[in-house]
Amino acid sequence: MLEELRITGLGVIEDTILPLSAGMNVITGETGAGKTMVVTGLGLLFGGRADAGRVRADPGRAVVEGRLRLVEPAATAVHTRIADAGGEVDDDGSVLLSRAVTAEGRSRAHVGGRSMPIAMLSEVGDQVVAVHGQSDQLRLLRPAEQRAALDRFAGPEHEKLLETLREAYAQWRRVCDDLADRRRNARERNQEADLLRLGLDEITRVDPQPGEDEELKAEAQRLEHAEGLRTAAQTAQQCVAGGAEPTDETPDATALLGLARRTLEAQAGVDRVLGDLSARLEEAATLVGDVAAELSAYLAGLDADPARLQTVYERRAALRALTRKYADDVDGVIAWADRARTRLSDLDTSDELLDELDRERQRLAGQVAELAARLSAARREAAGRFADQVTVELAGLAMPHARIELAVLPRPAGRGEPTVTVDGVETAVGPDGADEVELRLMAHPGAPSLPLQRGASGGELSRVMLAIEVVFAGSGGPPTLVFDEVDAGVGGQAAVEIGRRLARLARSHQVLVVTHLPQVAAFADRHLVVAKDTGGAVTTSGVRVVEDTDRARELARMLAGLPDSDLGIAHAEELLAVAARERRP
């Protein structure tokens, strides 16, 4: 849950702290006091779009900070993601989040004490909070959103089936596009393939080997300077191991090291230091002997053959001809050849390949059709359950005769989308299946079943939205739910029922409600009031928690606009008592 929210420099809010509790939190206040800024701040904190026009001129920077404490199952996934990104979770399991926006529109985010991309706040927000407002009601009117809502309700197995369909659909469309492109651009493909084959033939004739150009360069240098190398190696060998005709006047290094070692060894019994030095000379003699052997092998392998040098020159010329055309070095030429072979397979327009692709296209089309049929059946089953549960909730929201229907219909063909045959009917299909989903409302018995956007008033739409959220809450979802005046256009008994349903949600979720209805506010576990101060040169707002008498005065203000009216306070206290009884399990 979100334990605390601090907002600075946002709209009319100069600097305020909202202490939030588990259960149901309501936020009330006069029109224009800044209730909407609280929801705006929540949106910013969880990665929403920043509007620089909301930033107060003084100090020219808006900051929203929040302390988030999670419980399982959300805690592990969120904490792991934050730790992977370099953030830190406090010892008590809470995480600090912050978002800063300047008047120039620049934005920065911090998660767990570390600077993070704004997208990280969005990732956290997707898992811990769901915000519902008037815009969400409008979004619910879109058929695609209604289908997505049904898919979420259907459960994890349904989601797996949907993901399988999406993968099969993507593979099917790739094969279809590949086949169409090969047929449509056969001439261009054949011309490109001919050029690639010419290059591959030339490279194949030369047959370059990895690193061959560098090896030939080194060999050419040795052959060109063979005499100088031979002289240097012979001289060094004579110095360390003696030549073919050694003389007493020029003793070699091996002999001198041997003499030195034996001389010291003879005195090792007198002084152990000379014995240690004698051992080290023996190691040096061994090393010099190894060098002498390697010099001998080097001389034996040193080649001064002019014919070999000419062969090396010719081979290097052939490799340079390739590097001038295809890459900077031999390894690059080999890589070009590998890419060319891969590209040739992509350019293939042979009848055999086209027939094979066509068979694969038909196989995948059948797979997509079969998965789409299974998905349609699953949606129809889930639609019945979903509609029944939402209808039950509407009965408790002062719409006892209303009924929700969720129609799952085949997507009509002929709109430019690919088609498959599903249950014997040619149907347009997309990555989400072959269905159109339409949420309908029958306002009362005998009334026509109309699409939600045509059959529901503003107040009815608010109640349908809340009923859907109550149904979703039974299946889990984010631990924190925010409702921004979803009770607009509602009053009387319906308002009491909305408060009761929100209180029920608060048993399993943290609920934040921005409301203008006292019937809803009375059900809160914590009541916060946004108060406007116009005493200074600039209007500002702050937030305070109200309890007991102050809470009754606020409800009296909401009821009749008279916070000091004895009759209004008495009515408010009665409303609080009723709500307290209703909140008991």
Image: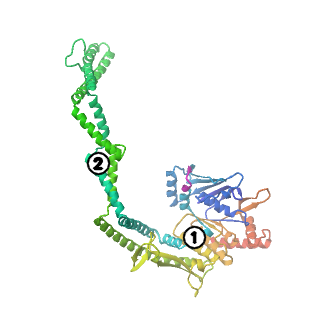
Residue ranking furthest to the top = 249
Q: Position of residue 122 (x, y in %)?
A: 55, 58
**CA–CA distance in space, label 1 to label 2:** 60 Å
Nearer-N-terminus badge (1/2)? 1
Q: Is residue 384 visible?
A: no
Q: Is residue 63 above or below residue 415?
A: above
Residue ranking furthest to the bottom = 446
Residue 565, picture quadrant: bottom right
Task: State the quadrant of the N terminus.
Answer: bottom right
Reply yes or no: does residue 274 show up in magenta. no
Horizontal arrangement in the rendering, residue 536 relative to residue 266 (left or right): right
Q: Position of residue 211 (x, y in %)?
A: 31, 41
Q: Position of residue 470 (x, y in %)?
A: 57, 72
- Mark 2 packing: few (<14 Cα in 10 Å), some, or many (20+)? many
Q: Which residues are magenta?
A: 115-120
Foreground disc of the pair 1, 2 = 2
Residue at point 39% right, 77% down? Answer: 421
Q: Is residue 377 above or below residue 66?
A: below
Q: Nearer the viewer, residue 405 or 401?
A: 405
Q: Which residue is mark 1?
A: 139
Pointers 1 and 2 in contact (C-beta within 8 Å): no
Q: Position of residue 185 (x, y in %)?
A: 37, 64
Horizontal arrangement in the rendering, residue 454 relative to residue 256 (left or right): right
Q: Nearer the viewer, residue 268 or 56?
A: 56
Q: Which residue is mark 2?
A: 203
Residue 28, picture quadrant: bottom right
- Mark 1 packing: few (<14 Cα in 10 Å), some, or many (20+)? few
Q: Specify the amino acid type for callout 2.
A: Ile
Q: Specify the amino acid type for callout 1.
A: Arg
Q: Is residue 358 visible?
A: yes
